[in-house]
Amino acid sequence: MIQHLFRATRLLLLTAAFAISSLAQERSPLDATYWGVVYDVPATRDVKVRADVPYSGALTADIYLPPGLKAGEKRPAVVFLNAIGDRPDSKIKSWEIYKTWPRLVAAHGMIGISMDADATKVQESIRGLFSFLTERGAEHHVDAARLGVYAASANVRGAAEYLSGEHAAPGIRAAALYYGAPPPGKLRTDLPVLFITAAGDAPGLGAPLTGLWQRVVEAGAPWTLLFASRLPHAFDAFSDNDDARRIIQQSLAFWKSNLEPVPAPPWQPSPARAIVAATYGNNPQQTADLLSRWVADHPKDADAHLHYGRALMQLRRTDEATAAYEKALALGSDHPGVLAGLGQIRLGRQQWAEAEQLLIRAVDGGMRNSQVYGQLAYAQLHQGKNEEAVKNYENAFAAGIPPGANTRGLASYNLACGYARLGKKDKAFEMLAQAVNENFGARTDYDGDEDLATLRSDPRYQPLVERLPKSRP
């Protein structure tokens, strides 16, 4: 309900702006449409305007051309979308914000375009403009393959409808959406979007706003979310301060970086850099594929065999990972990653003593994270080295074990077993409680574990395990 009220309020404000502008020949400074963008540069004075260029029937567009254009030259263009439509007595492109913004864009070397729209056929109007730009934009210096979009307030909804539809112009490469509601539906993964929320609007946007970042991450959409702290709705027209101007600068840079060619680097592409990028991009299949070729060409690169082993482990290709790690060792590597990797493999094969020695060497080599400490402790627990195991589980907790049943929950349970073996009941119950809190295991696991036998007669035991499911699903 809050979201709907918010949208209704914005539409009422827009309606009021129309009404005020139609009541008087000269707009009052209290009319919202009186105010233009709060950012200016000297070059705006040299911008040329082609006003009222017909693009579809009686509908026209104003085209703002940058200084210094040469005959036949084409530039990227930013379209200031009218996605709510005009009234007969007032056109949106006559508002100061829709006159000064495209002029500012033109002053920065791109072409600015504002538009009429038929209020009864808004989407058709938008399609008509982009069809015009595709077919005849070159006549007005527009490169229709490099188009940006600006949509603000109530226009964001209609803009999002167009941009997500099948008729969206393929030349649109970037969209800046100002202080509108988050668009519903599937997010495009091929369109960079700068989505700006004004602090004054945020309370009324509710769950759709707070859930937007999760939607962006889940979709892998190339969105930039920007929170305009301390700024009101329509801040680019109403907030005459540097906070607003900085966001306008960011918007101009966003369009330019997506619409203008990026200078080519003077160097050739590096296979090694591509491998590092794939590794840090957490793409084990791509990393393994690239490293397979690399180690074939660089068989004595010990670090390459280390990275190859890691990628293969992530792909659960354990035998190949073993060979890669052992090759690194044979080449003289003492990298703790090699030792930890082999130690993990030995652990999985229940070769406890070998795993322990490799993991100790990894820790001594500087690999002191919670995973290595936990694996070392697990190997020692299986060998009955209870004091050493307890110490290393404690080290793992001190290093920071991530929450979760199979991370902190599992480690808590194993440490409880270690404490129980050493007769430290209070410590054991403390860790068992933590394992239960992390939802680790089922009651049958606890009731059947010999390590916990000494705890089961304690009155603290039954209330604790009763919080667990009886058995694993």
Image (tube, grey):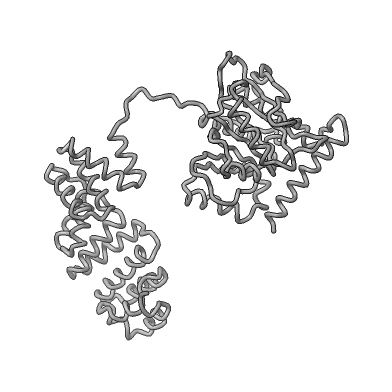
User: Where residue 153 sits: x, y (%)?
Assistant: 68, 42
Q: Quadrant of the rendered structure where residue 370 is? A: bottom left
Q: Quadrant of the rendered structure where residue 371 is? A: bottom left
Is residue 360 among what the camera can see?
no
How many discs mark residues in the rendered view? 0
Residue under the point 70% across and 36% down: 239
* Quadrant for the N terminus in the image: bottom right
Is residue 326 among what the camera can see?
yes
> Residue 360, relative to residue 249: is it above or below?
below
Question: In the depicted view, which residue is nearer to us: 303 or 398?
Answer: 303
User: Where residue 382 sits: x, y (%)?
Assistant: 20, 69
Residue under the point 63% across and 29% down: 132
Most extreme residue toward the left is: 330
Residue under the point 80% across and 39% down: 18
> Residue 388, relative to residue 264: is it above or below?
below
Q: Quadrant of the rendered structure where residue 461 is? A: bottom left
Question: In the depicted view, which residue is nearer to us: 148 or 131?
Answer: 131
Judge from the rendering whether residue 125 lies leftward or rightward of residue 184; answer left or right. Answer: right
Question: In the depicted view, which residue is nearer to us: 15 or 323?
Answer: 15
Judge from the rendering whether residue 66 lies leftward or rightward of residue 97; answer left or right. Answer: left
* Quadrant for the C terminus in the image: bottom left
Residue under the point 62% across and 45% down: 161
User: Where residue 21 sits: x, y (%)?
Assistant: 83, 35
User: Where residue 413 sits: x, y (%)?
Assistant: 32, 70
> Residue 406, relative to residue 225: is it above or below?
below
Judge from the rendering whether residue 331 lies leftward or rightward of residue 455; answer left or right. Answer: left
